Image (cartoon, rainbow, N blue to C red):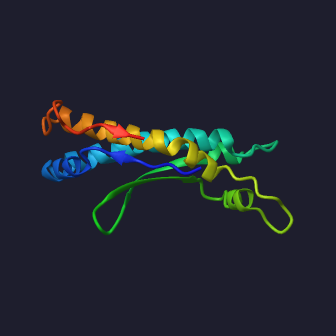
């Protein structure tokens, strides 16, 4: 399942985030991304295979907050705890095991909602910090 996103006011939002103090901008971005990532994490966790006994793969889906990239951008990742490498065997299958994907279907189903949440949270942070106006802010998202 594919999805498309149209963000109205995206350039204005990006410029406003650049105009904000760096610390406030990074916090707004990190918080908004973490909120969107949480939607995907919950979906992945509910779709992940569960096996009897502990530890369980589904209970080890995590958000890796504030992955710092060399280009200065803020990013947040959804992934698996260390030691649970076998999620890939479930996702893609092996020569002896049929694929039981849960990552990609979860992203496909929650991606549009996560993007909408991220943009709304970014605009709310920008307006709350006094760097944008509620009127004509371009904070709409069409999915």
Position of 110 relative to 70 (above/below): above
Q: How many marks?
A: 0
Q: Position of residue 74 (x, y in %)?
A: 33, 56
In-front residue for pair 138/96: 138
Question: Which residue corresponds to the image point at 13% horizontal and 39% vertical from the top-left?
Answer: 131
Expressed as whole percent of the image width and height from the top left, the position of residue 8 reads 28, 44
Q: Is residue 16 above or below residue 117?
A: below
Residue at figure coordinates x 70%, y 53% from the top left: 101
In this rendering, the answer to whether 77 lies above or below 95 is above
Residue 59 in percent (x, y) is at: 65, 42
Q: Residue at x 36, y 47 (%)?
A: 6
Give the position of the C terminus as an image quadrant. top left
Q: Position of residue 69 (x, y in %)?
A: 35, 65
Q: Nearer the viewer, residue 123 or 5?
A: 5
Q: Is residue 84 left or right of residue 73?
A: right
The quarter holding residue 27 reads top left
Q: Residue at x 80, y 44 (%)?
A: 51
Nearer to me, 10 or 91: 10
Residue lying at the far right of the rendered structure: 96
| Residue 67 shown left or right of residue 109 in the figure | left
């Amino acid at each position: 399942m594919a999805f498309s996103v149209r963000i109205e006011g995206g350039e204005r939002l990006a410029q406003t985030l650049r105009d904000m103090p760096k610390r406030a901008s990074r916090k707004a971005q990190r918080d908004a991304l973490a909120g969107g990532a949480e939607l995907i994490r919950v979906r992945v966790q509910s779709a992940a295979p569960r096996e009897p006994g502990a530890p369980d793969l589904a209970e080890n889906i995590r958000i890796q907050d504030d992955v710092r990239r060399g280009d200065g951008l803020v990013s947040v990742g959804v992934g698996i705890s260390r030691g649970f490498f076998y999620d890939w065997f479930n996702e893609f299958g092996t020569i002896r095991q049929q694929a039981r994907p849960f990552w990609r279907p979860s992203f496909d189903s929650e991606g549009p909602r996560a993007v909408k949440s991220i943009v709304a949270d970014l605009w709310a942070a920008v307006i709350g910090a006094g760097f944008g106006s509620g009127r004509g802010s371009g904070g709409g998202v069409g999915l």
